Image (spheres, rainbow, N blue to C red):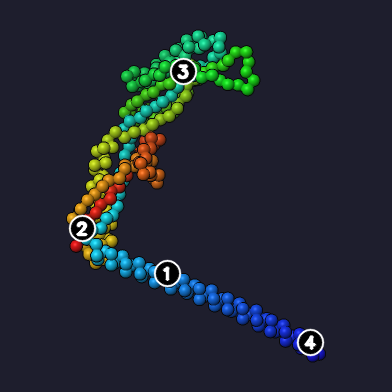
Amino acid sequence: MQVNYIGHLIKVMLVKNIFDIIYIMENKNYMMFGLILGLSIILSTALGAYTFYKLRSMDYITTTGSTKKSVVSDKVKWTSNITRPVKTSTIKDGYSKLDADLKIVKGFLASNGIPEESINISPVFMNEIYEQNPGIEKNYNLVQNIEVQSTDVQKIADLAKNTNSLIINNGVIFSTNSLEYYYSKLPEVRVELLADAVKDAQARAEQLSLAGGKKIGNLKSASSGVVQVMAPNSAEVSDYGVYDTSSINKDIMVTVKASFEIK
């Protein structure tokens, strides 16, 4: 009976010790949380006070402003090619067929209102086709690039999607390599946007100066960053600038770093 009582007492003490340990650990967690929270408040207050002090002691403030404008491309470059597969023994015949293919393509472009002066034809080049199990004769592709540049952007964009008749009706192996869209009035838009970017920088400077109980004065200096020509809703920027050519619609963004007097 005494042994059972002692065993029970030991169990009670063990349980009590476990709860004491848990209580201490929980209280340590609360203490640690409180310590971190207190330090965060102190640091935030100190940072705010330091910012206030710096603004009070500075005689100028520098901020960065930006602005953006949506535009529609006014130039397009359409690059395509025609191809003729040949063997060593049929190269001469292949050149003749490729020349006939080129006449068909030019006729197709002319019938769709593309003037000849907008078309640039490259020399023919020949690519060897390397095969794992080559036969007696080597195989090649005769390729000729065709480039169209135009200010009728939408017409070229639509035409590039409807070239099936060249292949279906005439047997021409025609493929589009790329459609590149450009905006020719970029310098004018850049000048226009610089003023708005400075205004944005000024608005930011005003907000910062208010924290120090001061007001901004005259513009001391300003320098513009690189122009970013981006696809709509894109966040892709670069220190050297980006120029998206894949989209007809574009966003032009300009940034300015400006310094203002503080009074």
Q: CA distance from mark 4 to mark 1?
A: 54 Å
Label whose residue precedes the other's in the sequence (4 or 1):
4
The amino acid type of the residue labelled 2 equals Glu
The quadrant of the rendering that contains the C terminus is bottom left
Q: CA distance from mark 3 to mark 4?
A: 101 Å
The amino acid type of the residue labelled 1 equals Ser
Taking the spot 43% from the left edge, 73% from the top edge, the residue there is 38
Q: CA distance from mark 1 to mark 2?
A: 33 Å
Label whose residue precedes the other's in the sequence (2 or 4):
4
Q: Is residue 133 above or below residue 234?
A: above
Q: Position of residue 62 (x, y in %)?
A: 27, 55
The amino acid type of the residue labelled 3 equals Phe
The quadrant of the rendering that contains the N terminus is bottom right
Residue 218 tag number: none
Q: CA distance from mark 1 to mark 3?
A: 69 Å
Q: Are marks 3 and 2 in contact (CB under 8 Å)?
A: no
Residue 261 tag number: 2
Q: Which residue is tagged 1?
A: 40
Q: CA distance from mark 3 to mark 2?
A: 63 Å
Q: Which residue is tagged 4?
A: 4
Q: Are marks 3 and 4 in contact (CB under 8 Å)?
A: no
Q: Are marks 1 and 3 in contact (CB under 8 Å)?
A: no
Q: Is residue 225 above or below residue 50?
A: above
